[in-house]
Every structure is written in C-alpha cells, then in structure tokens.
Amino acid sequence: MHPFKFLVMGLMTLLSSSCQLISPIFVDYNGVRMDVARWINNQQLLSMQQKRSLAQLSKAQQKLYRIEQIPQDQKLAIATQNQIALYCARLHLTENKISQLQNIIFGENEKVAILQKYAEEFPKVKLDASAIQCE
C-alpha cells in the first residue's frame, strides 16, 4: 500500500509543477516585472484566464509606481489603460486577488498613497464596455 501512496504523491507533484512550466506559454508576461510574473505564475488555483487578467492589470498598474514622475500629457492614456485592465480583472478575479497583486506591485506601505494620488490627479475615464478588449 505504501508504494502506491508514493506513486500517487509523485504524480501529483509532477502534474502541479508541469502546470507552472506550461503557464508562461499561455500567459504573456512581456512587460510584467519578474517578481510579479513569478507571483502570478505561482498562483496554482487560478485559471489561465485569471492569470492573463492579472498580467494585464500588472502591466497597467506598474506604470503608476513612479506616479509623481508621469507627465501630464500621458495621464489620459495611462488612466484609460488602467480602467480597461481593472474592468477585465474584475470580470475574472476577486477584489482580494486584485489587492494582493497591488501589494506586490506597489508594496503594502506605498499602495494606499499611490492609489490615492491616482484617484486625485488622473482623469476619470468612462469606457464603453462593448469596445473593451481583454487579454
């Protein structure tokens, strides 16, 4: 009976690690910070669509990391990209998972200040849901 348990445990380990190897093929991490991409890839209970949504949101939110240095003429484009990414993320993810991603991107200490500055200084964009393309 014990050899059977070891065989099952070995197969489960192999299957879970192979999913981590396959994930980068289906999720475009280009433009995502390496530490954030690793965190997304290690979220084993998420579907590929959920991981794609996290990657899309990460690409948009990373631009806010140095929010005080963003020129005025780029704020509308960045706000639009962020609104689209948040819309897509909310279709597939919980607010808790989005918050966890933001903690990784900004750091828990900086997150509130960055998102507050974003809310105060960036234009509010109204999107047409039928025109949004999610990754």
Image (tube, rainbow, N blue to C red):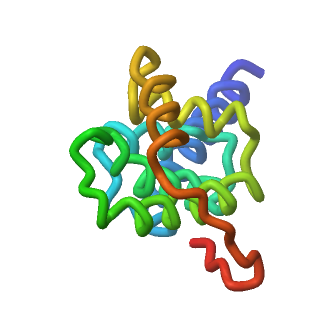
Q: Is 16 on the left or on the right of 94, as rendered? A: left
Give coordinates of residue 8: x percent, y percent: 69, 35
Q: Nearer the viewer, residue 67 or 101?
A: 67
Give coordinates of residue 79: x percent, y percent: 49, 59
> Is 119 rendered above or below residue 113?
below
Q: Is 100 on the left or on the right of 36, as rendered? A: right
Does residue 106 appear in this view?
yes
Of the 4 image quadrants, the one containing the C terminus is bottom right
Q: Quadrant of residue 78?
A: bottom left
Of the 4 image quadrants, the one containing the N terminus is top right
Q: Residue furthest bottom?
A: 131
Give coordinates of residue 43: x percent, y percent: 57, 39
Picture residue at 61% right of the left edge, 40% below the top: 44
Give coordinates of residue 38: x percent, y percent: 39, 41
> Is 74 rendered above or below residue 104?
below
Q: Is 88 on the left or on the right of 74, as rendered? A: right
Q: Quadrant of residue 52?
A: bottom right
Does residue 18 appear in this view?
no
The number of numbered badges drawn on the structure is 0
Q: Is 48 on the left or on the right of 33, as rendered? A: right
> Is 66 rendered above or below residue 104?
below
Picture residue at 30% right of the left edge, 46% below the top: 33
Picture residue at 68% right of the left edge, 72% below the top: 127
Q: Quadrant of residue 6?
A: top right
